Image (tube, coloured by chain):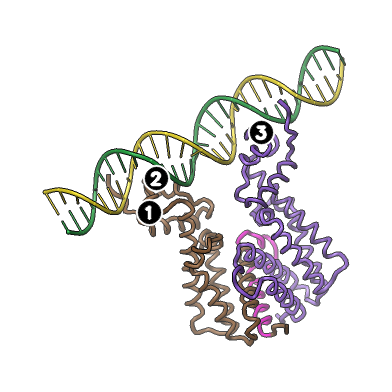
Chain colours: A purple, B brown, C yellow, D green
Amino acid sequence: MARAGITADRLVEAGAELADAAGFEQVSLSALARRFEVSVPSLYAHVAGSHDLKTRIARLALAELADRGLAALAGRAGKDALTALGNVYRDYARAHPGRYAAARMPLDPAAAAASAGPRHTEMIRAILRGYDLPETEQTHAVRLLGATFHGYVSLELAGGFDHSSPDSERSWSRAMDALDALLRHWPDE
Amino acid sequence: MARAGITADRLVEAGAELADAAGFEQVSLSALARRFEVSVPSLYAHVAGSHDLKTRIARLALAELADRGLAALAGRAGKDALTALGNVYRDYARAHPGRYAAARMPLDPAAAAASAGPRHTEMIRAILRGYDLPETEQTHAVRLLGATFHGYVSLELAGGFDHSSPDSERSWSRAMDALDALLRHWPDE
DNA sequence: GCAAAAACCTAAAGGCTTTAGGAAGGCGTA
DNA sequence: TACGCCTTCCTAAAGCCTTTAGGTTTTTGC
């Protein structure tokens, strides 16, 4: 019988597509085996199991997000940079909801360290260079920005802002205005 | 054989406890059947299935959160109220991680409308009364606050702030300072 | 006290993961 | 070219989960 030419990367890519189309929780070795017309145990030659596959999808998503973020930040500073990075997260989550969900999956310390996670922190730190925050406040601001980006995107994705006016587009724009204002007038300790 | 005296409420309560102890994704009819020493199909007399059970746990969590929020807001205004509500979310999530995860589960429109979700929006709106925001900006601010609370708590719960200094406690406190400052100096449209 | 409703049961089908062990395709080398 | 080995793929089987179907026992209420 002809070989299907499966590799770990092809599995992860197909898993990511499935996640975007049907939801991250629908990703299973069974579904991928059907997709590649191969028996389920065959997949164990390429990935160590279901958890391994999902972890790889998470790392793919984190890396894609970091790549896009870095590209968006190039040549921008201040509010321009802030908005650009925010839009990268938001647009990615809306275009690839399954991948975004994967990126939020808790990774064990080993996998987390090997992921693009730290690059995300770096990107937000880079934005802060356009504002005038004391060194001791940097980490607090990074956490607040990360939380707000993630929180907004995740609530919007869950449909929290559907069917209510004003539309989410406008709220997002005002959220960026607000974060910019906050960073320009960061409260004293 | 003696009856176990199972009711939907007891199932939901046990499910919530299991979620807090082992994680929301570990909640299953099988686990609860073992817990009550009853066969799995018996549970279908009380809940409509696994999804129904999880939805009920989500609604329980939303209601508990709203109750605590309301109690915390009584007699407070301004930054005091802001911090109090933020702490309710954060403390609840840390004390009941499984329930908190359940509360974040996407509900179908019918279940969402019957849940305590709208009360949460009301609570944040109440906080805004202590600040001077134009009517048209209220919804934007509600969304930003909700997103930031949820985002921070969810990142912290996922361990995002572990093993890095300064400690999360301090960042949280500064986040409350920052949100207060933001609401006092909300940027013009 | 008896009927009906409610709580519980076994049986069974179907989906998912994972391990064990066997067959076949393809590549490197003699 | 042909041999052998590694890798890819297979079937079989066990274990866990959900859900439906249909039967029995306990409890409740008239």
The residue labelled by disc 3 is A38
SS under mark 3: loop
- What residue lies at 56% left-to-right and 73% top-to-bottom? B87
SS under mark 1: loop
Instruction: Name the kind of residue labelled 3 in the image.
Output: Val
The magenta region covers: B156-184
Q: Chain of mark 1?
A: B
**Vertical order, B185 against B149 (above or below):** below
Q: Which mark is residue B46?
A: 1
Instruction: Name the kind of residue labelled 1 in the image.
Output: His
Dominant secondary structure of the residues highlighted in magenta in the image: helix
Instruction: Name the kind of residue labelled 2 in the image.
Output: Pro
**Residue A167 x/y as whole percent:** 66, 72
Q: Quadrant of residue D2?
A: top right
- What residue lies at 61% left-to-right and 70% top-to-bottom? B149
The residue labelled by disc 2 is B41
* Residue farthest along the bottom direction in this orientation: B132
Q: Is residue A27 left or right of residue A185?
A: left
- What residue lies at 52% left-to-right and 58% top-to-bottom? B98
Q: Chain of mark 3?
A: A
Do circles 2 and 1 both sit on a common chain? yes
